[in-house]
Image (spheres, rainbow, N blue to C red):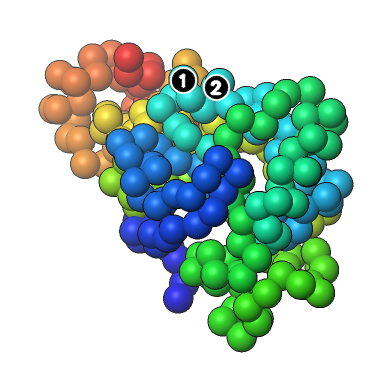
Amino acid sequence: MSLRINDIAPDFTAETTQGPINFHEWIGDNWAVLFSHPKDFTPVCTTELGAVANLEGQFSARGAKVIGLSVDPVDNHEKWAVDIEEVGGSKVNYPIIGDPELKIAKLYDMLAADEGDSCEGRTPANNAPVRTVFVIGPDKRIKLTLAYPMTTGRNFDEIIRVLDSIQLTSKHKVATPANWKQGDDVIITGAVSNEEADKIFPGYKTVKPYLRTTTQPK
């Protein structure tokens, strides 16, 4: 099964460092960021989990819950969390899913169905595709997927930027241009006529007949 934007994020039950969860129930009416890792005690992933711990307040301010996943048992995650706090400087207060039977990695199409059913004996290289970020909306639909190579640490500031864009454009008839950040001008979508734009976005700028910009809506 290949997951695409606007697909319903597959639901699952799992053990986490904060106890068992049902994923859709855990999301509730919030946004969610699920980010996965090929194995515990790996260097790049240690820095990433620490980065998210430092940014958790920013995600929370946007109504977004964060949750990690690693293809190892929860007991290992709890030991790893000590290293993550020492390296990143912040306590890991968000849950990390244990996936020792590879069920969720397969459910989310990060590993093939024939990859076995145990993390035992597997190396990070075996699990290299399990380095994906999923942003999921309150409607439980996938809004963003990003897959990273093992040697490139993820930019979670960028994920916050995308979350800002997704939330803004879900409320207003706008899109965000390349390299947009909070406070920059936005693009009026093609679904809005010029007559409507005059009323909704007075003073908008026509760059090209198909490209109209306006200040970011409040």
User: Which residue type carries mark 1?
Assistant: Ala
Q: Determine which quarter of the picture holds residue 56.
A: top right
Q: Looking at this view, is 143 or 40 the one in front?
A: 40
Residue furthest bottom as drawn = 114
Residue 58 percent across, percent down from the top left: 55, 22
Binning the other alpha carbons within 10 Å of mark 2 as few (below 14), some (14 to 19) or many (20 upward) gives: few
Q: Where is residue 164 shown, x and y percent of the image? A: 46, 29
Q: Which residue is mark 2?
A: 58
Side of 141 relative to 106 (left or right): left
Find residue 73 and report its horizontal and vertical position in percent.
68, 58
Determine the residue positioned at 79% across, 35% down: 82
- 41 vs 168, left or right, is right
Q: What is the number of the mark on residue 61?
A: 1
Q: Quadrant of the C terminus?
A: top left
- Residue 26 numbered tag: none
Residue type indicated by callout 2: Gln
Foreground residue among 72 and 105: 72
- What is the quadrant of the N terminus in the image? bottom left
Give SS at disc 2: helix
